[in-house]
Amino acid sequence: MAFQKSSHIFTKIAFKPLRTNLFYIVLLAYFLTIGSSTLFGQETKKTPKPFPAKNQTITPAKDANLLTKKDSGSVKKIDAFKVDGSNKFKSVLEGKVKYRAKKYAKFDQKKKLITLYDGAELNYLDYHLKAGIIVFDYEKNEVYAGRLKDTLGNYLQLPVFTQGANVIEPDSIRFNFKTKKALIWNSRTTQQELNIKAKISKKENDSIYFMKGARLTTSKDIDDPEYYFLVNKMKFVPGKKVVIGTTNLWIENVPTPIALPFAFFPITEKSHSGIIPPSFGQNNDRGYALQNGGYYFALSDNYDLAILGDYYTNGSYATRFESNYASKYNYNGRLNIRFENLISSERGYPDYAKSKIYNIQWSHTKDTKSNPNSRFSASVNLGSSQYFQQSINLANLGSTLNNTLSSSVSYSKTINTIPQINFSLSATHSQNTNTKSINMTLPSLQASVDRIYPFVGKDGVKKGFIKNINLQYSLRGENQILTTDDLFFKKEMFSNAKIGFQHSIPLSTNFKVFKYFSASTSVNYNEVWTLNTIRKDFEITSLPPLLPEGKEVITNINGFDAFRTYSVSNSLNTTIYGTFNFGKNNRIQSIRHVMHPSVSHTYTPSFEKYYDTYAIDASGKTAQYTRFDNGIYGAPGKNYSNNIGFGLTNTFEAKVRDRDSTKTEPKKIMLLNNLNLSTSYDVSADSLRWAPMRLSGGTALFKQKMNINFATTLDPYALGKDNETKINTFNIEDGGSLFRMTSANMTINYSITSSKEDKTKKNVQGANNGGREDDLFGSNTELNDNRDSQFAKKDEENDGFTGFYNAKIPWDMTFAYSVTYSNLKNERRISSNSVMISANTDLTPKWKVGVSTGYDFVRKGVTFTQIRLNRDLLSWNMSFNWSPFGQSYWGFFIGIKASVLKDIKWDKRTQADRILK
């Protein structure tokens, strides 16, 4: 609950600038009275009549006689600033007086008055005053300022009094420079987000102000606000507090029953600790609830803490710890820890269920400028697999379809030596919320030494086979943990941890062949260290006269062991350009086709020496295994491999004449971003030498707004009669086609908006939860936590339009379609086929409507659906969210936008139905 600082200060007229911040309302017993003491000290026995009076204005015909007599001084017409520092003022003035007036400036030496009329300005010390008319009594050090009235009865040239950063705009003002006391009529001022207009304001001293008949509002129109709090009496202590007496809420100048006998506003430039009021809710399974209530701790300028909680009448509760931290030019981050104890129904009923879920999110970003050679980052999202599916917090509804949680914390360091050395230490986490399996590396170490070219001369030229020979060294070490949600951070989780290190030294070179071909060759040496190996044995469980039976026994062995492998690889590739010209007079002038064919060869010898033999049954039948099976970095290969790979990458681009006749150059349009084919042939294999062909491609249409991606796998071999295994017979020889399509998929994503620039609001919280940045699966919005940004006015979209109807209706839409075909075992079925749509529009500049929905064609049902209605009520916001299908819920909210009064709200919602597992 930190709030922004205002550029205007509340009725501050003298000396030191105020830096204040208004926070939330806290009830405090305080009643105000205004005394009848003398306003301007002991210099006068009777308070002089203010100028102008409460309801009095000055007309041009009467101004001169009202202020001073014509024979008591002289009248001058002033068009520019004059500076007067003559001896006649030295006995009473503390500094030079600068003044200006359009019509005249009049001096009365007898009464010690300076009168400025029409466009009057007066500068004295650090005070600056502008008004229609100004009277300066330099003997008493008092100034009077007022407005003018034209022949039509309209008021103009209202006073503007400035002292430092403090600005006040009243109808009239009387101020004493010496005692610093002031009397102001109809003052208008801004205190942060709060606009205040008071009938009478009295400045008692540098630290106390009294106001009577004040209007407090956050409306931009301070003279005609759509709502305001009418305050009878108010006391303002700069930099400390604002205390008000009886106040009543008025809407459209109509009083409401909402009233307070007193209220207290603490003022501080820094964040302030305080209570966060809860919202009221209800759920059919858990009863009534108080949600999102807690306490905010303003710990320092660099970090804070908010403790929030929910409580249901059936005993369910939730606790959340949210902290933000930042250090300028160094780092910033956010930490969220959430725990929920969920109870469904009542104890003793058959549908009674209880579960505990949690979620931890941490993001940390380091400013690269603080230390370019050292980097630290964190993106953590881990917890119970069913957290987002079961959470009672409405902000998590848009993440119920997430099926993965992932985390990464890393530190990297660069040592600028020759050659350069890089190393990093990281911890990663990947969690499948459907299977509840968790894969962690805790930690992972990586180090590398930059490439070394031993045969490059002093000139540094790398050309040819010999000079391009280079070598590199890299090290990778991991402590890998495979576990489940139930065993997470328990003792059993670490019992099956695998530890290993991998050393790699590639020696490679590249060169040109026949000018147009790029060739490369490399020898790769790998050495793997491990602390976990296995031993396989056969244990006999029954003895004669029964038939001997037994089972395979695997024993884990802890201790250091290692294996070493090497391989040789070669590659040859080139680029082929083809252009089809259709003539400059045609709409499509040419199509360019770019092909990148490549051929690769990899040879890996057999490392059978790492294999042992063990019995697999009681008859003495044996099999081979390696003790490095199931290692982090795999196991050495038993059979040698002699593999030839083929690849072809294609791009298609068109040159099209621009529709704009003023442009002479044609524009380029990408027809196909990529069209890739790849396969391989194993020379050493006895059968099934050809690997399945992989075909993939993608393109972007409609000015890069629609992305289409497709892929398929084509197998040249046929299936056996059982439709389970492949046989060494080509599919075409078995009576089929040339290739057998085993799988295919296509995705279409289309995002459009009415504006030229994509200003679609990102679903940041949804992305943090592991989902999408758009709102296809609904918006992760807590109604009462998103008011400041939800209705941010976009003048560039509305073009300043403030009426009811606007011909330009802003809108945006996101469309996603996905289909998958499966035919691995001749099942020939569509395994998934769904469409998702999200649309948002502004029906009027104040009405916003959004919907997220979809349909699953395989399951024949509507997917998660969310309907959103938002109404901008100027200083207020109104929101309504409704999910009619599946996890049905609705929520309604209305409240003041400004953070200073954010606790004035009404929030009603029903809790979404959840299933505990």
Image: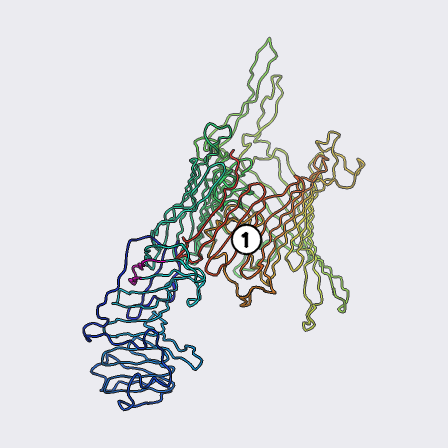
Q: Work out whether 746 lies above or below 205.
A: above
Say which quarter of the image contains residue 742: top right
Report the span colored magenta: 233-247
Look at label 1 and name its amino acid: Leu
Q: Work out whether 198 lies above or below 107.
A: above
Is residue 388 at least partly visible in the picture? yes
The answer to whether residue 37 is left or right of residue 492 is left
How was this image coloured?
A: rainbow
The answer to whether residue 654 is left or right of residue 307 is right
Where is residue 321 shown, x and y percent of the image? 40, 45
Count of numbered labels shown in the rendering: 1
Q: Which residue is mark 1?
A: 869
Where is residue 439 shown, x and y percent of the image? 51, 38
Residue situated in front as seen by the camera: 208 or 512: 208
The answer to whether residue 198 is left or right of residue 46 is right
Q: Secondary structure at mark 1?
A: strand
Residue 140 in the magenta stretch? The answer is no
Residue 237 in the magenta stretch? The answer is yes
Is residue 440 at least partly visible in the picture? no
The answer to whether residue 645 is left or right of residue 297 is right
Q: Work out whether 810 lies above or below 323.
A: below
Where is residue 422 shown, x and y percent of the image? 47, 50
Residue situated in front as seen by the camera: 153 or 637: 153
Residue situated in front as seen by the camera: 290 or 488: 290
For the residue carrying disc 1, how many other residues have a C-alpha within 10 Å: few (<14), some (14-19), or many (20+)? some
Where is residue 670 shown, x and y percent of the image? 68, 59
Q: Work out whether 791 lies above or below 17.
A: above
Main SS type for the magenta part?
Answer: strand
Residue extending furthest toward the top: 545
Residue situated in front as seen by the camera: 270 or 785: 785
